[in-house]
Amino acid sequence: MSRIDVRIYAVEIPMPKDANVIIGRSHFIKTVEDIHEALVNTVPGIRYGLAFLEASGKRLIRFDGNDEELVEAAIEAAKRIAGGHYFVLYIRNAYPINVLERLRHVPEVVELLAATANPVQVIIGETGQGRAILGIVDGYPPLGVETEEDKRERHEFLRRIGYKK
Protein backbone atom coordinates (compact mmCIF):
# COMPACT_ATOMS: atom_id res chain seq x y z
CA MET A 1 0.00 0.00 0.00
CA SER A 2 1.40 3.39 -0.95
CA ARG A 3 1.34 6.38 1.33
CA ILE A 4 -0.64 9.48 0.36
CA ASP A 5 0.32 12.79 1.92
CA VAL A 6 -2.51 15.03 3.14
CA ARG A 7 -2.25 18.76 3.69
CA ILE A 8 -4.76 20.15 6.20
CA TYR A 9 -5.80 23.80 6.43
CA ALA A 10 -8.81 26.05 6.97
CA VAL A 11 -10.54 28.46 4.60
CA GLU A 12 -12.90 31.23 5.66
CA ILE A 13 -16.30 31.35 4.03
CA PRO A 14 -17.79 34.78 3.20
CA MET A 15 -20.87 35.71 5.25
CA PRO A 16 -23.07 38.29 3.52
CA LYS A 17 -25.11 40.56 5.78
CA ASP A 18 -28.46 39.11 6.93
CA ALA A 19 -27.75 35.72 5.35
CA ASN A 20 -27.42 32.13 6.52
CA VAL A 21 -25.19 29.56 4.85
CA ILE A 22 -25.84 25.87 4.39
CA ILE A 23 -22.95 23.68 3.26
CA GLY A 24 -23.45 20.11 2.16
CA ARG A 25 -22.32 17.24 0.01
CA SER A 26 -24.26 15.97 -3.00
CA HIS A 27 -23.50 13.77 -5.99
CA PHE A 28 -24.87 15.01 -9.30
CA ILE A 29 -25.32 18.25 -11.29
CA LYS A 30 -29.09 17.77 -11.01
CA THR A 31 -28.50 19.07 -7.46
CA VAL A 32 -28.70 22.65 -8.72
CA GLU A 33 -32.22 22.35 -10.16
CA ASP A 34 -33.53 20.16 -7.34
CA ILE A 35 -32.30 22.49 -4.58
CA HIS A 36 -33.87 25.42 -6.45
CA GLU A 37 -37.22 23.60 -6.53
CA ALA A 38 -36.96 22.59 -2.88
CA LEU A 39 -36.31 26.19 -1.81
CA VAL A 40 -38.96 28.01 -3.84
CA ASN A 41 -41.61 25.37 -3.12
CA THR A 42 -40.92 25.48 0.62
CA VAL A 43 -40.54 29.22 1.34
CA PRO A 44 -42.23 31.62 -1.09
CA GLY A 45 -40.12 34.78 -1.34
CA ILE A 46 -36.88 33.09 -0.28
CA ARG A 47 -33.75 34.75 -1.66
CA TYR A 48 -30.82 32.46 -2.37
CA GLY A 49 -27.50 31.87 -4.05
CA LEU A 50 -26.25 28.34 -4.73
CA ALA A 51 -22.96 26.93 -6.01
CA PHE A 52 -22.25 23.25 -6.65
CA LEU A 53 -18.75 21.88 -7.23
CA GLU A 54 -18.85 19.30 -10.01
CA ALA A 55 -16.35 16.46 -9.35
CA SER A 56 -16.03 14.92 -12.82
CA GLY A 57 -16.64 15.74 -16.46
CA LYS A 58 -16.17 19.48 -17.00
CA ARG A 59 -15.59 19.96 -13.22
CA LEU A 60 -17.29 23.35 -13.18
CA ILE A 61 -18.78 25.38 -10.38
CA ARG A 62 -22.46 25.16 -11.29
CA PHE A 63 -24.69 27.91 -9.84
CA ASP A 64 -28.19 29.31 -9.53
CA GLY A 65 -30.06 31.84 -7.47
CA ASN A 66 -32.29 34.88 -7.37
CA ASP A 67 -30.06 37.18 -5.27
CA GLU A 68 -26.93 38.32 -7.10
CA GLU A 69 -24.96 39.07 -3.93
CA LEU A 70 -25.71 35.60 -2.54
CA VAL A 71 -24.89 33.92 -5.88
CA GLU A 72 -21.51 35.71 -5.96
CA ALA A 73 -20.82 34.73 -2.31
CA ALA A 74 -21.71 31.09 -3.05
CA ILE A 75 -19.37 30.99 -6.04
CA GLU A 76 -16.57 32.59 -3.99
CA ALA A 77 -17.10 30.08 -1.15
CA ALA A 78 -17.08 27.22 -3.66
CA LYS A 79 -13.77 28.47 -5.10
CA ARG A 80 -12.28 28.52 -1.60
CA ILE A 81 -13.48 24.99 -0.82
CA ALA A 82 -12.52 23.68 -4.29
CA GLY A 83 -13.52 20.09 -3.51
CA GLY A 84 -15.79 17.94 -5.62
CA HIS A 85 -19.46 17.29 -4.93
CA TYR A 86 -20.01 19.97 -2.29
CA PHE A 87 -22.58 22.73 -2.43
CA VAL A 88 -22.78 26.12 -0.75
CA LEU A 89 -26.20 27.69 -0.33
CA TYR A 90 -26.83 31.17 1.06
CA ILE A 91 -30.39 32.15 2.00
CA ARG A 92 -32.28 35.30 3.01
CA ASN A 93 -35.95 35.81 3.93
CA ALA A 94 -35.85 32.36 5.54
CA TYR A 95 -33.88 30.46 8.14
CA PRO A 96 -32.17 27.08 7.81
CA ILE A 97 -34.87 25.57 10.06
CA ASN A 98 -37.37 26.43 7.27
CA VAL A 99 -35.55 24.42 4.58
CA LEU A 100 -33.29 21.78 6.16
CA GLU A 101 -35.89 19.01 6.25
CA ARG A 102 -36.75 19.64 2.61
CA LEU A 103 -33.05 19.67 1.63
CA ARG A 104 -32.60 16.29 3.36
CA HIS A 105 -35.17 14.89 0.92
CA VAL A 106 -33.45 16.19 -2.23
CA PRO A 107 -32.34 12.91 -3.87
CA GLU A 108 -28.80 14.10 -4.63
CA VAL A 109 -28.03 15.46 -1.13
CA VAL A 110 -25.73 13.07 0.72
CA GLU A 111 -25.22 15.09 3.91
CA LEU A 112 -25.59 18.54 5.42
CA LEU A 113 -22.44 19.84 7.11
CA ALA A 114 -23.37 23.32 8.34
CA ALA A 115 -26.35 25.64 8.64
CA THR A 116 -25.57 28.95 10.33
CA ALA A 117 -25.38 32.72 10.28
CA ASN A 118 -22.14 32.62 12.29
CA PRO A 119 -18.66 33.12 10.86
CA VAL A 120 -17.60 29.84 9.21
CA GLN A 121 -14.28 28.20 8.55
CA VAL A 122 -14.07 25.00 6.53
CA ILE A 123 -11.32 22.53 7.44
CA ILE A 124 -9.91 21.14 4.19
CA GLY A 125 -7.84 18.03 3.58
CA GLU A 126 -5.94 18.08 0.29
CA THR A 127 -4.20 15.22 -1.53
CA GLY A 128 -2.70 15.02 -5.00
CA GLN A 129 -6.15 14.01 -6.29
CA GLY A 130 -8.21 16.79 -4.76
CA ARG A 131 -9.81 18.29 -1.68
CA ALA A 132 -12.33 17.18 0.93
CA ILE A 133 -14.12 18.93 3.75
CA LEU A 134 -12.94 17.40 7.01
CA GLY A 135 -15.05 19.61 9.25
CA ILE A 136 -16.66 22.97 9.90
CA VAL A 137 -15.84 25.63 12.49
CA ASP A 138 -19.18 27.32 13.21
CA GLY A 139 -18.98 30.47 15.31
CA TYR A 140 -17.03 30.64 18.56
CA PRO A 141 -16.52 28.55 21.75
CA PRO A 142 -19.00 28.91 24.65
CA LEU A 143 -18.42 31.56 27.30
CA GLY A 144 -20.33 29.81 30.08
CA VAL A 145 -23.34 27.69 31.01
CA GLU A 146 -26.94 28.84 30.60
CA THR A 147 -28.49 30.37 33.74
CA GLU A 148 -32.16 30.37 34.69
CA GLU A 149 -32.38 33.93 33.30
CA ASP A 150 -30.80 32.74 30.03
CA LYS A 151 -33.38 29.92 29.85
CA ARG A 152 -36.21 32.40 30.35
CA GLU A 153 -34.79 34.63 27.57
CA ARG A 154 -34.47 31.60 25.26
CA HIS A 155 -38.08 30.56 25.88
CA GLU A 156 -39.35 34.12 25.32
CA PHE A 157 -37.29 34.56 22.15
CA LEU A 158 -38.61 31.36 20.54
CA ARG A 159 -42.19 32.41 21.26
CA ARG A 160 -41.65 35.98 20.10
CA ILE A 161 -40.38 34.83 16.69
CA GLY A 162 -43.17 32.26 16.34
CA TYR A 163 -41.31 28.96 16.71
CA LYS A 164 -43.03 27.94 19.95
CA LYS A 165 -46.45 28.65 21.46
Image: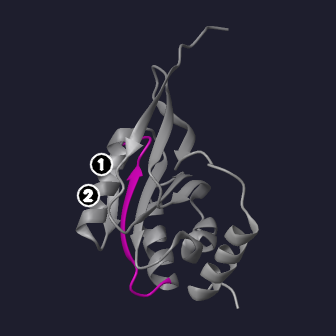
Q: Residues within 10 Å of mark 1 (few under 14, many from 20)?
A: some
| Position of residue 144 measured from the top left corner of the image (x, y, whole percent) | 67, 51
**Quick one: 80 or 63, which is closer to the camera?**
80
The local crowd at label 2, few if under 14, some if 14 to 19, many if 20 or more residues have their Cα within 10 Å, is many
> Disc 2 marks which residue?
72
Quadrant location, the N terminus: top right
The amino acid on which the numbered mark 1 sits, given as a three-letter code, is Glu
Q: Position of residue 159 (x, y in %)?
A: 64, 86
User: Which residue is labeled 1 in the image?
Assistant: 76
Q: Which residues are magenta?
A: 43-58
Say which element carries label 1. helix
Q: Is residue 30 above or below residue 129?
A: below
Q: Residue furthest bottom?
A: 165
Type of the residue with mark 2: Glu
Against 64, residue 132 (above or below) is above
Residue pushed farthest top?
2
Q: How is the image coloured?
A: one colour
Residue 81 can be seen in this image: no
Residue drawn where x is 47% and y is 31% of the image: 131
Residue at the location (38% across, 86% down)? 45
Q: Secondary structure at mark 2?
A: helix
Q: Position of residue 65 (x, y in %)?
A: 32, 69
Q: Which mark is residue 11?
A: none
Q: Are marks 1 and 2 in contact (CB under 8 Å)?
A: yes
Which of these two is toward me, 76 or 129?
76
Given residues 38 and 81, the one toward you in this image is 81
Residue at 47 percent of width and 68 percent of height: 35
The span from disc 1 to disc 2 (Cα, nearest Å) is 6 Å
| Residue 2 magenta-highlighted | no
Q: Does the segment drawn in magenta span residue 45?
A: yes
Quarter of the image for residue 48 reads bottom left
